Image: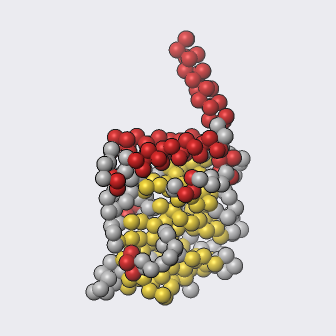
């Protein structure tokens, strides 16, 4: 009986701490984890994998814990956005937090936590495992932008993510997302390609074919709000760039009222 009372008390205490933390205090906590990751980084020459493993788990857990709060979803995180990749949809109902786990080598490992506003007033989170699996598309990549297409059945979100495979090999992923009630649908088949309906498109390229771009991260996917269309470059493999040379030609997909189709 006493143990049960203690357990319940601890649950209420934990909940009260989560609620009482101000967004600024939460930002301080998240920055603390990122600072420890940076100090223990494999890219600094003195990697501490025990610290890296623990801090990545702690950071992920903190984002999940605080991510259920609507004030966290609306908070701009002025300092945090300089330390990780923070992307928010135009309507403010979907956000991603992506960071380098600091455990990789030339192939970087990234972690992503999704935060979204459900149909009710509830805010939810979904967290991916830190991984560099190309087959899972977004896993191992960092989300840099979230575009929004308004439809009769609700917004379709287009998340753009970047993958770092090596010093020269990179890739970008265009992934459709939808908020379905209190659930985040990460596989809505709303893009019609030659192979049928899918929820995403990806392409790989040689980073040095776009190294002269001034912006970082490199921006290769563009969205036209008025036309409800996104476009991405044609990539050509040749002897000089077997991993793919980004050209100045584009492939465009436009929303036709039901799905995105190539135009």
Locate residue 41, reporting x and y percent: 37, 50
263 relative position to 74: left or right: left
Residue located at (61% from left, 68% from top): 147
Residue located at (69% from left, 69% from top): 151
Decide: is 37 above or below 238.
Answer: above
Residue nearest the observer in this picture, 252 or 32: 32
Decide: is 40 above or below 210.
Answer: above
**Display coloring:** secondary structure
Query: Quarter of the image holding residue 234?
Result: bottom left
124 relative position to 71: left or right: left
Residue located at (49% from left, 69% from top): 217
The answer to whether residue 183 shows anywhere in this view is: no
Residue located at (57% from left, 77% from top): 222
Locate residue 70, reporting x and y percent: 68, 47
Q: Quadrant of the N terminus?
A: top right
Locate residue 208, reporting x and y percent: 37, 78
Q: Quadrant of the C terminus?
A: bottom right
Residue nearest the observer in this picture, 94 or 77: 77
Query: Quarter of the image holding residue 52?
Result: top left
Decide: is 56 above or below 85.
Answer: above
Decide: is 11 above or below 131.
Answer: above
């Amino acid at each position: 009986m006493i143990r049960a009372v203690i357990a319940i008390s601890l649950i209420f205490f934990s909940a009260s701490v989560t609620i009482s933390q101000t967004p600024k205090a939460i930002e301080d906590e998240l920055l603390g984890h990122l600072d420890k990751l940076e100090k223990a980084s494999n890219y600094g020459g003195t990697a501490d994998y025990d610290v890296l493993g623990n801090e990545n788990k702690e950071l992920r857990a903190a984002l999940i814990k605080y991510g259920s709060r609507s004030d966290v979803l609306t908070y701009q995180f002025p300092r945090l956005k300089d330390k990780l990749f923070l992307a928010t949809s135009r309507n403010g109902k979907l956000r991603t937090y992506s960071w380098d786990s600091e455990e990789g080598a030339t192939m970087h490992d990234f972690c992503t936590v999704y935060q979204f506003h459900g149909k009710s007033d509830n805010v939810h989170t979904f967290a991916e495992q830190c991984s560099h699996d190309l087959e899972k598309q977004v896993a191992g990549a960092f989300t840099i932008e979230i575009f929004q297409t308004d439809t009769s059945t609700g917004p379709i979100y287009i998340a753009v993510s970047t993958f770092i495979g090596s010093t020269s090999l990179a890739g970008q992923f265009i992934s459709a997302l939808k908020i379905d009630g209190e659930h985040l649908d990460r596989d809505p088949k709303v893009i019609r390609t030659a192979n049928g309906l899918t929820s995403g498109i990806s392409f790989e390229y040689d980073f040095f074919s776009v190294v002269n771009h001034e912006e970082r991260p490199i921006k290769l996917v563009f969205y036209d709000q008025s036309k409800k269309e996104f476009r991405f470059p044609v990539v050509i493999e040749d002897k000089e760039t077997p991993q793919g040379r980004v050209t100045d030609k584009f492939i465009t997909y436009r929303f036709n009222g039901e799905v995105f189709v190539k135009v």
